[in-house]
Amino acid sequence: MRSIFLLCVVLAGAFVLAACGPSAGSAPTQPAAQKSIDVQVTMTEFKIEPSMTNFKAGVPYRFVVTNKGTVNHDFSISPPVMEGMAGMSSEDMHKNALAVIDAADLPPGATKTVDVTFTKPMSAGEMEFACHTSGHYESGMKVPMMVTQ
Ligand SMILES: [Cu+2]
């Protein structure tokens, strides 16, 4: 019985840690002292061209996303699309995204910014810059990125 009790204590502790720990996503509030680093991202048909793809955990970045194409694009930092996800809505694709700019907010010529501070290292390809507007991802609008400590 004692070991079961201990197991419960350990599980409860893990749960509390998980609940209180830093979320996997971006930090909405940034320390005012640390100025963010601008990352320029250009979107066209059908390419995403970021000024950098290797990032450091804990550093605030401001993604400055410009649509230089002729149709709307969306922008996200999200897990790669896996087999079986084809046909999912961009909303569904964005459920695990660290950052999203909706296609409605990125018409041709528009520039939108989104702030992201990566909280943990990520291996190459774990997350990518992507456009999930129907057909765009398949046409090449994805770029792998990584985060180091
Ligand atoms: Cu697109």
Image (spheres, grey):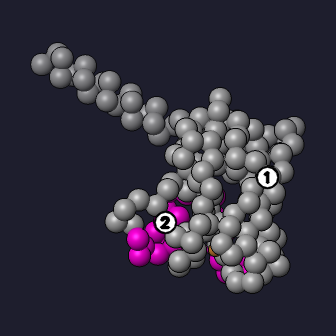
115 w.r.t. 149: above or below: below
The residue stretch that appears in magenta = 86-107
Q: Is residue 59 magenta?
A: no
The residue sitting at 55% across, 56% down in the picture is: 78
Q: Which residue is mark 1?
A: 51
The residue sitting at 41% across, 76% down in the picture is: 87
Element type where label 2 sits in the image: helix
110 w.r.t. 48: above or below: below
Q: CA distance from mark 2 to mark 1?
A: 24 Å
Q: Quadrant of the N terminus?
A: top left
Indicate which quadrant contains ligand 1. bottom right
Q: Where is residue 107 drawn, in percent x and y? A: 74, 81
**N-terminal label among 2 and 1:** 1
Residue 18 visible? The answer is: yes
111 w.r.t. 38: above or below: below
**113 vs 138, nearest the viewer:** 138
Quarter holding residue 83 = bottom left
Q: Quadrant of the C terminus?
A: top right
Element type where label 1 sits in the image: loop
Residue closest to the far top: 2
Q: Where is residue 94 drawn, in percent x and y? A: 53, 64
Q: Amino acid at mark 1?
A: Ser
The residue sitting at 57% across, 42% down in the picture is: 124
Badge 1: how crowded within 10 Å, few (<14), some, or many (20+)? few
**Disc sitting over residue 93 in the figure:** 2
